[in-house]
Image (spheres, grey):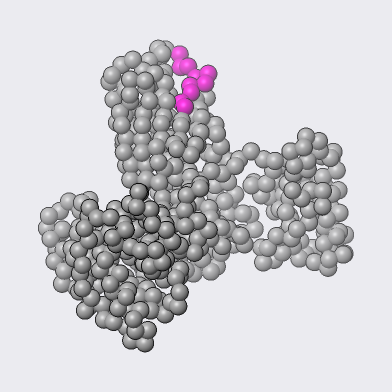
């Protein structure tokens, strides 16, 4: 299996796509202005205690107050809080971490006995805001690297259960025990298998430095809430967890992000640094690598997957519901049971991809086509289990119930990725009437004339749908050449699959959009 990662950086947002054997399996898109993400650590302030829930709400500077349950405060919470008091009591000299004390928390305690309103506490985001809920927090602070996870005030060295060799487990454990600093616990990740002391020591030193910088930020903070440690960018975080020998290329269309990723890959896997490539072509990166078309066909309420069969996917507040339909599919020479099994097995393949692609979390209920034979139902369960092995999110799958339903739970840490694929008419904006389409190119020429002769913008790019671009470029005396004779050769016409048929956009040389919509077009 060959994996590829594509990063599309735009002025307002960044999109990340992962393809396995050219098939899109993961897609993430986030606004560049977002500041609250998984793994960030804050010095927050307790806003409200909820003894009935044994929890509290914490102000970390987000729009919605974050939620912290007593069970999530962690074994090291009291130790960290005492150390924070020692650090903030003297803002000129940092209290040595090596002298900090361990304080054991009562696992059956009460939130009101540990916290009080207005108290400043160190917390880490474990779930991003979802729907009406604010971020979910933990007091178990950790710093994740590629090979190791550092836990301040931890006292154990744990080894990933996926490392099976007893000899290797013992080697890694003894090695980390000999180099880890006092008052720190360490989790050894699967990718650390076979790594030498120098690599592990280097990363451990880096993680300890992150912790020390976080405490220094606490000491400098005048008032909570304040961000004291920011997690790596989404691209770096993905690489940290995913990069392995199956990756063939990492393609990025932005020089700054390219340099950042190349430096990181050079640090964690120097032999793979040449797989990081800068994309400089005019065509949008996702169009060039056939990602846009897969996004359009893979999202939405109805997803076709095999010979006419399709899935209907509904998202609700409490759970996700999937209905499997055979459509008009019926193979000659196969009875109803055989057809049902084949459609269901195909659905299991597509569903495993959809879960990762949309990052569906929480409770998922799948209504498969009914099958009479117990061995066929077992085959379906085994196929689903096998497909989900490639999913990084924690999950649990139950066999088919007597009603033909499969229940799945999947780790939910951020809102489900729901990409609208239905296009609003760019001319009427859903009102039902449009200008004559034959006049579209005249409308575009008017806007080019405005840019060049009224706004004095000589260099720009015009993005239009590929079908329209083909029409504009056709022939020796094409519309494009005609426009260039009138208005100069400072502009380029670029096809963009993400646009609707009569959609368009203008950008300056820096990639920033030039708003050329008429007043009645703006909604």
Q: Is residue 292 left or right of residue 318?
A: right
- Which stretch appears magenta? 323-332
Give above or below for 44 relative to 448: below
Residue 284 x, y percent position in the rendering: 61, 54
The residue at 31%/38% (across/down) is 396
- Magenta stretch mostly in which secondary structure? loop
Q: Position of residue 155 (x, y in %)?
A: 18, 65
- Residue at 85 percent of width and 60 percent of height: 450
Percent x, y for residue 171? 14, 63
Q: Is residue 39 visible?
A: no
The correct choice, above or below, for 299 with respect to 479 in the image is above
> Which residue is at 16% across, 69% downward?
177
Q: Is residue 326 magenta?
A: yes
Query: Which quarter of the picture shows residue 91?
Result: bottom left
Taking 397 as reference, is 38 left or right?
Answer: right
130 on left or right of 459? left
Residue 35: say if magenta.
no
Count the marks: 0
Residue drawn at 59 percent across, 49 percent down: 287
Please state which of residues 264 and 516 is positioned toward the viewer in this rendering.
516
| Vertical order, 488 against 6 (above or below) | below
- Asked whether the viewer can see residue 225, the reply is yes
When asked about the image quadrant of residue 341, the answer is top left
- Residue 242 in the image: state x and y as whole percent: 37, 55
500 or 209: nearer the viewer: 209
Q: Nearer the viewer, residue 122 or 514?
A: 122
């Amino acid at each position: 299996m060959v994996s590829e990662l594509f990063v599309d950086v735009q002025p307002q947002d960044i999109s990340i796509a992962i393809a396995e054997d050219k098939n899109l399996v993961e897609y993430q898109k986030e606004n560049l202005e977002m500041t609250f993400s998984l793994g960030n650590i804050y010095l927050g302030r307790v806003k409200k205690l909820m003894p009935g829930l044994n929890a509290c709400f914490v102000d970390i500077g987000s729009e919605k107050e974050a939620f912290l349950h007593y069970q999530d405060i962690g074994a090291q919470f009291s130790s960290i809080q005492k150390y924070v008091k020692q650090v903030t009591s003297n803002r000129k000299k940092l209290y040595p971490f090596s002298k900090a004390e361990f304080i054991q928390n009562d696992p059956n305690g009460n939130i009101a006995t540990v916290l009080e309103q207005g108290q400043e506490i160190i917390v880490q985001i474990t779930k991003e805001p979802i729907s009406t809920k604010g971020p979910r927090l933990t007091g178990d602070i950790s710093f994740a690297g590629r090979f190791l996870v550092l836990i301040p005030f931890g006292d154990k060295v744990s080894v990933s259960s996926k490392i099976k060799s007893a000899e290797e487990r013992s080697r890694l454990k003894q090695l980390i025990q000999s180099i880890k600093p006092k008052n720190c616990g360490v989790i050894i990740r699967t990718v650390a298998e076979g790594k030498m002391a120098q690599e592990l020591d280097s990363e451990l030193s880096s993680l300890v430095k992150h912790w020390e910088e976080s405490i220094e930020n606490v000491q400098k903070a005048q008032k909570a809430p304040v961000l004291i440690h920011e997690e790596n960018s989404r691209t770096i975080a993905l690489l940290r967890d995913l990069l392995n020998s199956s990756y063939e290329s990492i393609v990025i269309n932005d020089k700054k992000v390219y340099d950042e990723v190349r430096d990181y890959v050079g640090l964690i896997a120097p032999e793979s640094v040449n797989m990081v490539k800068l994309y400089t072509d005019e065509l949008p990166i996702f169009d060039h690598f056939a990602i846009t078309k897969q996004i359009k066909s893979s999202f939405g309420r109805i997803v076709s997957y095999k010979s006419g069969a399709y899935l209907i996917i509904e998202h609700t507040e409490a759970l996700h519901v999937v209905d499997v339909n055979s459509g008009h599919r019926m193979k000659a020479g196969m009875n109803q049971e055989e057809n049902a099994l084949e459609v269901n097995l195909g659905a299991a393949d597509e569903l495993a991809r959809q879960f990762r692609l949309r990052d569906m979390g929480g409770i998922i209920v799948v209504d498969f086509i009914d099958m009479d034979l117990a061995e066929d139902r077992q085959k379906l369960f085994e196929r689903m289990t096998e497909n989900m092995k490639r999913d990084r999110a924690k999950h649990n799958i139950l066999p088919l119930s007597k009603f033909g339903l499969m229940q799945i739970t999947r780790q939910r840490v951020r809102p489900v990725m729901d990409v609208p694929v239905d296009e609003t008419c760019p001319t009427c904006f859903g009102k039902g009437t449009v200008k004559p389409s034959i006049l579209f190119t005249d409308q575009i020429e008017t806007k080019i004339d405005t840019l060049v002769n009224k706004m004095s913008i000589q260099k720009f790019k015009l993005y239009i749908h590929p079908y329209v671009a083909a029409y504009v470029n056709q022939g020796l005396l094409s519309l494009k050449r005609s426009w260039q004779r009138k208005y100069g050769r400072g502009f380029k016409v670029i096809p963009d699959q993400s646009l609707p048929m009569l959609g368009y956009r203008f950008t300056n040389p820096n990639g920033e959009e030039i708003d050329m919509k008429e007043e009645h077009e703006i909604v």
